[in-house]
Image (cartoon, rainbow, N blue to C red):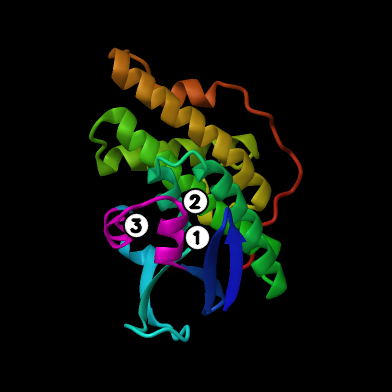
Amino acid sequence: MKVEEWNGHRIRFIDLNGDWWAIGTDVTDALGYTNGRDAVARHISNEDKNTVVFHDGNRGNPRKVVVNEYGIYDLVLSSHLEEARPFRRWVHSVIKELREAVGLESYQAFKMADVEHQKEAMRQLNEGLGNAQPVDFIKANTIANKAISNQYGRPKMIPKKEMSPAMLADREAVLNDVVSLMETKERFGLNLHVSEIIYSRGYRKVTLPVHTPAN
């Protein structure tokens, strides 16, 4: 277990199979939630939380709900506390240090950050469209993947899981543009083709060889 402090609050982290998870109530207390259990239940998906037996020397139920990095960000995004953004940056730095301490490769850490950005972009799309359907999420990601494949001179679209760190970094900006255009089209009822605009944007072309990360 690792204990870190932020703004007078103790945040306990435990290592579960190589990933760092925080005690849920520690995070909700730090973010000003009056009902931590309810906040975790409402804001965090099942894959980003878990229940473990945790002995901290205090009496009471040893079963604790823990949340992973993405679950923490879900709580941050839903908090009205002014310090929520600084807390998010603090989480980034702390978990980075914890990863480095256990020798996690930088590419793996980057992949984790990319997943967090992906979730946030899809959340924004859902809010922008009012009630986004699965096809809307698929469309946004397909356009972004195709645009990056074009940018890197690939004759066919490659899936995100096969992209290099450089491609993933460029993809974040493209996905943001796609989401913004889809929101604008919906809001003003515009007759435009998002894919055509994105593909014609003239993103920086990359001609250097790109190596696909090993599985």
Coordinates of residue 21 in the picture (x, y in percent): 49, 69
- Which is more toward the observer, 78 or 103? 78
Query: Relative to residue 30, is residue 164 drawn left or right?
Result: right
Q: Residues within 10 Å of mark 1 (few under 14, many from 20)?
A: many
- Which is more toward the observer, 169 or 64? 64
Secondary element type, mark 3: loop
* Residue of label 2: 116
Secondary element type, mark 1: helix
Q: Residue, x 63% and y 43% (percent of image)?
A: 169
* Residue of label 3: 44
Q: Residue, x 66% and y 56% (percent of image)?
A: 93
- Which is more toward the observer, 35 or 119? 35
Question: Is residue 178 visible to the viewer in this orientation of the structure?
Answer: yes
Quarter the N terminus occupies: bottom right
Our reading of the magenta stretch's main secondary structure is helix
Q: Kindly indicate whether the residue at mark 3 contacts the one at mark 2 (C-beta within 8 angstroms).
A: no
Q: CA distance from mark 2 to mark 3?
A: 13 Å
Q: Kindly indicate whether the residue at mark 2 contacts the one at mark 1 (C-beta within 8 angstroms).
A: yes
Instruction: Name the front one of labels 2 and 3.
Output: 3
Quarter the C terminus occupies: bottom right
